[in-house]
Image (cartoon, rainbow, N blue to C red):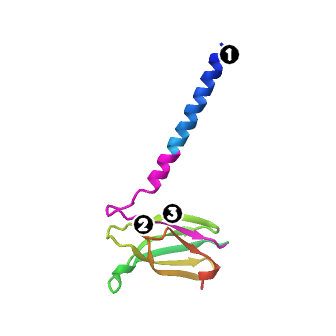
Amino acid sequence: MAFWAANLREAILKITALSLLAVAVLAGCAATLPSAPDGQNRVVDIVNTTDMPLNFYAVNAERRGVFRSRFAEGEVRGNYYRVVNFSDGSGACRFDFYAELADGRRASAPDFDTCRAVSWVVNAGNIQ
């Protein structure tokens, strides 16, 4: 009886480990899927390496000269990041990124290519 119990316990542990591995692999595959019908992934991490919160927004850079509305906006806590999908339905990859810290200092990344870059880091080097 002890032989069967040990084998059963080992089999259950192996099945559990394989199930967790399968879930991890599938989650990794889902994270790499394109986020838009054109096959381009426009998901970007907005990373705040400062100690204070920041507000960010982005506008479609390909619509210069016409009415430009904010496409994405939000807040990122200090020393944290936020994942944003910049697929606005226009097929645009380039957006002008803007951030303002709680103390009024600002950072920007004009013409940021969301189809190629995976993160925008706001740090002491790009804050004005």
Callout 3 amino acid: Val
Q: Which tag, 3 or 2, sits closer to the chain's start?
A: 2
The answer to whether residue 104 of the structure is visible from this angle is no
121 is within the stretch colored magenta: no
Callout 2 amino acid: Arg
CA gap, disc 1 to disc 3?
51 Å
Q: Contact, CB < 8 Å: mark 3 with mark 2?
A: no
Quadrant of the frame with the C terminus:
bottom right
Q: Which residues are magenta?
A: 24-50
Callout 1 amino acid: Ala
Element assignment for label 2: loop
Measured as percent of width and height from the top left, residue 3 is found at 65, 17
- Picture residue at 60% right of the left edge, 71% below the top: 48
Front: mark 1 or 2: 1
Task: Please give the residue where the numbered disc 3 appears in the rendered image.
Answer: 83
Q: Which tag, 1 or 2, sits closer to the chain's start?
A: 1
| 40 on left or right of 4 | left
- Picture residue at 45% right of the left edge, 51% below the top: 29
- Picture residue at 32% right of the left edge, 84% below the top: 66
Element assignment for label 3: strand
The 10 Å Cα crowd at callout 2, few under 14, some 14 to 19, many 20 or more, is many
Measured as percent of width and height from the top left, residue 57 is found at 48, 74
Location of residue 79 by image quarter: bottom right
The answer to whether residue 38 of the structure is visible from this angle is yes
Location of residue 61 by image quarter: bottom left
